[in-house]
Image (spheres, grey):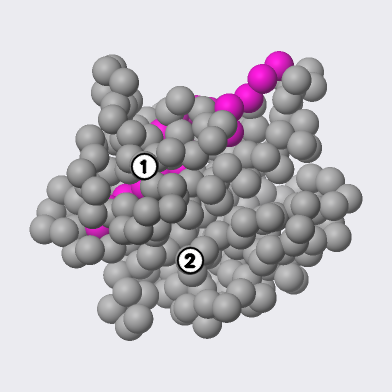
């Protein structure tokens, strides 16, 4: 039903030291090398060189969910299930290919069906990730984004709702950051490209402070931002993401006519093309 990303090399790849030293993008690195971040799943947080002429920019792509966290789900008109974690990884793969060909260095939060943080049995409750593990996983995604020294962060998700008549594309940014203007510009460019390419309803660009999604814990509810995009909050998000970012929800998995785009390779490639166009538009204006 969907493609998966190429596995990293069988040999243990070289690692890039991105501690306090500047300009990690200039350091030689094996392709697909894992960035140095504490506590990662072995297949997580990998950096890929451009395949076209380098343009000097790095994009961090976060395929939402993974492993024991499936995210949302829906089904096609024929009953075929569509699971968010599968579709986000597929879109990230197509998008990575496209961006690298355009000269970007790309860092992927995950390259397989795993969490980004390394999980232990203690993180699971009847096979599902505990709230503490979901929180740690999101912090690991931030740590990977920051280690990548990316110019932009794009978190890829799909919407789901208990009413199948909910449709359309929506993109979130966080207004409480020093670079909020650029995050908004990134979100607007991604949203416009999604609507133009997919021809879906335009739900618009929304502040994550207005998000009414369920939160994983009471502390998450008190925080009031998306963890990956939001500001520092001691004890909850000690080190926030350091670059402009947006979270896209290109369509509803619970709307069968839209879910087919997320389920099929040609639809996933179209979503990726839209996101690449959106990133290109953003960088051309910034
Ligand atoms: Zn999601």
Answer whether residue 169 is magenta in the image: no
Is label 2 in a helix, a strand or a loop? loop
Give x and y (percent) for residue 211: 73, 65
Quadrant in which the C terminus appears:
bottom left
Which residue is pictured at 66% across the width and 49% down the height? 160
* Picture layout, residue 7 above or below residue 64: above
Judge whether residue 129 can be spotted in this image.
yes
Answer whether residue 107 is magenta in the image: yes
102 vs 80, nearest the viewer: 102
Which residue is pictured at 15% across the width and 48% down the height? 51
Q: Which mark is residue 173?
A: none
**From this viewpoint, which residue is outermost toward the right?**
218
Could you tell whether 25 is left or right of 263 in the image?
left
Disc 1 CB within 8 Å of nearest ligand 1 atom: no
Which residue is pictured at 67% across the width and 40% down the height? 136
Give x and y (percent) for residue 181: 52, 82
82 vs 132, nearest the viewer: 132
Could you tell whether 221 is left or right of 171 in the image?
right
Quadrant in which the N terminus appears:
top left
Main secondary structure type of the part rendered in magenta? loop
243 vs 204, nearest the viewer: 243
Which residue is pictured at 48% across the width and 46% down the height? 144
Give x and y (percent) for residue 251: 54, 56
Is label 1 in a helix, a strand or a loop? loop
Give the magenta range: 104-121
Circle 1 sits on which residue? 17
**Corner quadrant of residue 122:** top right
Q: Upstream in the sequence, badge 1 or badge 2?
A: 1
Q: Nearer the viewer, mark 1 or mark 2?
A: 1
Circle 2 sits on which residue? 243
| CB under 8 Å between discs 1 and 2 | no
* Picture layout, residue 251 above or below residue 18: below
């Amino acid at each position: 039903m969907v493609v998966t990303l190429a596995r990293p090399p069988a040999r243990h790849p070289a690692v890039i030291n991105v501690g306090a030293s500047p300009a990690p993008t200039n350091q030689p690195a094996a392709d697909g090398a894992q960035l140095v971040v504490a506590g990662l799943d072995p297949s997580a947080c990998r950096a890929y060189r451009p395949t076209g002429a380098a343009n000097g920019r790095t994009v961090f792509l976060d395929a939402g969910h993974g492993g024991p966290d499936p995210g949302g789900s829906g089904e096609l008109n024929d009953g075929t299930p569509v699971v968010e974690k599968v579709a986000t990884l597929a879109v990230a793969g197509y998008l990575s290919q496209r961006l690298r060909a355009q000269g970007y260095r790309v860092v992927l939060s995950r390259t397989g069906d795993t969490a980004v943080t390394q999980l232990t049995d203690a993180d699971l409750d009847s096979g599902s990730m505990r709230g503490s593990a979901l929180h740690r996983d999101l912090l690991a995604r931030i740590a990977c984004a920051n280690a990548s020294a990316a110019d932009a962060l794009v978190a890829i998700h799909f919407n789901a709702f208990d009413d199948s008549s909910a449709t359309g594309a929506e993109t979130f940014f966080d207004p409480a950051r020093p670079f909020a203007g650029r995050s908004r510009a990134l979100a607007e460019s991604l949203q416009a490209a999604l609507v133009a390419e997919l021809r879906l309803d335009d739900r618009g660009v929304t502040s994550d402070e207005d998000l009414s999604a369920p939160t994983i814990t009471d502390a998450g509810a008190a925080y009031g931002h998306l963890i990956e995009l939001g500001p520092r909050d001691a004890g909850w998000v000690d080190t926030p993401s350091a670059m402009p970012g947006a979270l896209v929800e290109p369509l509803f998995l619970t709307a069968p006519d839209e879910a087919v785009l997320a389920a099929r390779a040609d639809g996933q490639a179209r979503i990726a093309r839209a996101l690449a166009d959106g990133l290109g538009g953003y960088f051309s204006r910034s």
